[in-house]
Amino acid sequence: MNRETLLAQAGARRDVFGAVSMPIYQTATFAHPALGQSTGYDYSRSGNPTRTALEETLAQLDGGARACTFASGLAAIDAILRLFQTGDEIIVTEDLYGGTFRLFEKIYRQIGITAIYVDTSDTAAVAAALTKNVKAIFVELPTNPLLKVADLTALAALARDRQALLIVDNTFLTPALLRPIEHGADLVVYSGTKYLSGHNDIIAGAVVAKTAELGERLYFYQNAAGAILAPLEAWLFLRGLKTLALRVERAERNALAVAKMLARHPRVKKVHYAGLPTDAGYERLKKQASGAGAMAAFSVDDPALVPAILANVKVFIFAESLGGVESLITFPAVQTHAEIAPEIRERLGITDRLLRISVGIENVHDLVADLESAINN
Ligand SMILES: *Cc1c(COP(=O)(O)O)cnc(C)c1O
């Protein structure tokens, strides 16, 4: 089955009574048919049919052996990091989601699991950073907020040589546009809060494992530590997934139009969007993904313009997060990336002139006109 079909029918054909919409099994526990027997479900931390429907759909979409869903994207990343031990090092994309940076720096560094930050769009820089203790390469593609594009096939080869895992945070592109396992990734992680569920109404996370062995280890941790996705959230996630292909297609078309306007605007100094042929990541992304998605960033010529834009927008909503049907605008230096030290932010280019946009599915003319007039005012 093609992805669009899998998505549209997410959760269908599973219910014993034929419910087309997978029911919400809002139950904590399940009766045992007899001593020593189980329906397959015993207790909802260990497993719940609504969550299973979602997890099997996600595993299928990415071509993985198994998926586990969690209460948030960060809980999903935390489950992955539990695979490592004191003394291990992990090469990590240098401009990445601020919450992931905080998890590495404030939780895992203390227990001796060390992140080495590298520009993962520079394969040679990754190769140079590979010490004998490196057990994984953790990549965001495209990066957040600068939208740089890594070469997954090359990174997978480097990881394989060292028997290290390649982990891809595919929150921005989703399996609708990129399936990292096909390019050699071992684990794919998502904030399901974003495009996958797509309506800015739940917090959720997921990990897809390429092998059953890795899937089993993640499942063990999911059950043992318990940061599971609840049945209602799993249902909302499934319901959002059904329209993923349509939403991503429309949002990407809108994003390209907005990016073109920004690229022409005299007060915009740089646009970061791999869907523009002039972008550094354009050719490389085209080889790996079927689209550039709908996340973009741009820097303006004067920091004083930033608060004015945030105050002037009427269609874009000034809010953190991304990947929903509504277009959002964020100021990374003070919002999503506030956890990163100012000197590192400055070196990376996450400056006081940089704004990030998540383009939604609204009317394209409304979006282009809104941002253009907010910059002009
Ligand atoms: C939002 C986000 C996360 C964290 O997910 P939560 O659901 O907020 O916990 C991780 N990675 C990326 C790229 C994100 O955008």
Image (cartoon, rainbow, N blue to C red):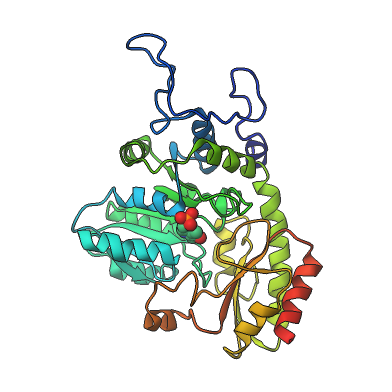
Kindly give the residue lying farthest to the left in the view shown: 87
Q: Residue at the location (47% across, 30% down)? A: 48
Q: Quadrant of residue 252?
A: bottom right
User: Relative to 136, is 144 on the left or the right?
Assistant: right
User: Relative to 140, is 290 on the left or the right?
Assistant: right
Q: Residue at the location (54% across, 65% down)? A: 284
Query: Residue 198 location in percent, x, y?
Result: 62, 51
Name above or below for residue 19 compared with residue 347. Answer: above
Q: Between residues 242 and 39, which one lies in front from this camera angle?
A: 39
Query: Residue 49 location in percent, x, y?
Result: 50, 28
Q: Residue at the location (76% across, 81% down)? A: 373
Q: Residue at the location (45% across, 49% down)? A: 188
Q: Between residues 326 and 169, which one lies in front from this camera angle?
A: 326
Name above or below for residue 265 compared with residue 5. Answer: below
Q: Between residues 360 and 307, which one lies in front from this camera angle?
A: 307
Query: Residue 29 location in percent, x, y?
Result: 43, 25
